[in-house]
Amino acid sequence: MSAEAETAVAETPAAEAPRLTPSASEAIPADDVERITADLISALKTVYDPEIPVDIYELGLIYKVDLDDNRNLTIDMTLTAPGCPVAGEMPGWVENAAMSVEGVQDVTVNMVYDPPWDASRMSEEAQVALNWW
């Protein structure tokens, strides 16, 4: 490899690791878990809090995801504020998005408020979008 090519490779940023890693049974092949995780992240990135122009994944509203032996997902999520006007609707939006992932059999969304959400859970992308740095 030429010195120029080595420099280009060294300057290329590594792919960012997903901020969401579902707990999964060993009964599901690792490559399936990886694909489901990537597809789930893409699906979650289509769900927005209507008052904030950033998706729920980048906002850090998804706390935990479990994938069981039967490919059922259990998602623990929160809201930016307990009094959010879409509190009753957002779990359904998340469920619908997660059900669009190929191979997922069922989805349960649990709304949790502990720990409370705070801005430190946001990704750098979300912070830039909201001018919070």
Image (tube, rainbow, N blue to C red):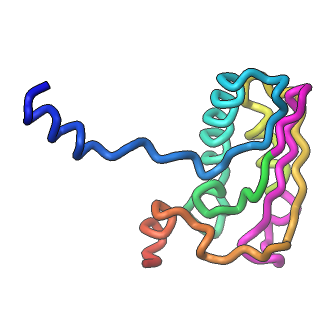
Q: Where is residue 121? Give x, y as percent.
A: 62, 68
Q: Please provide the residue range marked out in magenta.
A: 66-89
Please report the residue visible at 66 percent of the width from the left and 57 percent of the height from the top.
Answer: 56
Q: Position of residue 40 (x, y in %)?
A: 68, 38
Image quarter of residue 89: bottom right
Give the residue furthest to the left: 3
Type of secondary structure dominating the magenta stretch: loop
Placement of the N terminus among the 4 image quadrants: top left
Query: Could you say where residue 110 lies in the image, as x and y percent from the top left?
Result: 90, 56
Q: Is residue 3 above or below residue 10?
A: above
Quadrant of the image occupied by residue 31 = top right
- The image shows a total of numbered marks equal to 0
Considering depth in this image, is 100 or 15 the residue closer to the camera? Answer: 15
Kindly identify the residue that appears in the image at 47 percent across and 64 percent down: 124
Q: Nearer the viewer, residue 90 or 68?
A: 68
Horizontal side, residue 28 vs residue 80: left or right: right
Q: Does the magenta run of residues contain 33?
A: no
| Direction from residue 41 to residue 87 in the image, left or right | right
Q: Quadrant of the C terminus?
A: bottom left
Q: Is residue 86 magenta?
A: yes
Q: Quadrant of residue 28?
A: top right
Q: Is residue 94 left or right of residue 110?
A: left
Which residue is located at x 91 percent, y 26 percent?
70
Q: Residue at x 60, y 52 (%)?
A: 19
Residue 115 position, x and y percent, is 80, 74
Q: Nearer the viewer, residue 26 or 126?
A: 26
